[in-house]
Image (tube, grey):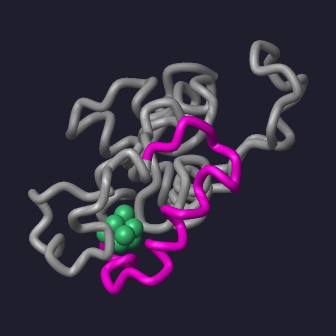
Amino acid sequence: MVTDLNPWYRAAACSGTDPELFHPDSESPAAQQDAKELCAACPVRETCLDEALAEEAGLGLTSRFGIRGGMSRRQRVREDARRRGVTPAPKRRHASTKPKCTKFMPKLTPEQREEMRRLWTDEGFTQIALSRRFGVAPKTVRRTLGLEP
Ligand code: SF4
């Protein structure tokens, strides 16, 4: 769901609809169906999705809300990772357990390593912000920054 701060809002298919439609109580496909159908026919869906991903850059699942650009928050996390060329870590069976090995953790390209160092030194990103932005473990961030062997 967009707000009227967006200049392209007047063309949005959801303009004037109840915002609750885009924030269903459940994340089941059935609960999201009406909103996604509206998005599918929306002439500014791509713009809406691009803006959502830009606004949410570096945020985790719990900091994303609702359906935007035709995608649920889980789909946007995956789309964000895909656009950044990062393979998301596989789902864990128990959220509280750490993976036993880092074999399946995403690997950073040399360009991503360079970008991470730039954000650290020039823009003051914290280690946790870098971890979220690049979808890697904090240990990988520390190693990339040369803070840990
Ligand atoms: S894509 Fe969906 S949320 Fe975005 S403007 Fe269109 S109808 Fe609204």
Ligand 1 sits in quadrant = bottom left
Near-viewer residue (93 or 97): 93
State the residue at coordinates (44%, 44%): 23
Near-viewer residue (48 or 32): 32
- In the rendered view of the protein, which quadrant contains the N terminus? bottom left
Residue 49: in sight, yes or no?
no
115 vs 119: above or below:
below
State the residue at coordinates (38%, 80%): 42
Tell me if 78 is positioned left or right of 83 in this view: right
**Where in the figure is residue 94, as x and y percent of width and height?**
84, 20
146 vs 108: above or below:
above
**Where in the figure is residue 71, as x and y percent of width and height?**
53, 61
Residue 91 covered by magenta stretch: no
Residue 36 covered by magenta stretch: yes
Residue 138: in sight, yes or no?
yes
Dominant SS in magenta = helix
Near-viewer residue (39 or 86): 39
93 vs 42: above or below:
above
Within the image, what quadrant is residue 149 found in?
Answer: top right
**Where in the figure is residue 60, as x and y percent of width and height?**
50, 35
State the residue at coordinates (49%, 67%): 70
Tell me if 3 is positioned left or right of 54 in this view: left
Near-viewer residue (70 or 61): 70
* Extent of the magenta region: 23-48
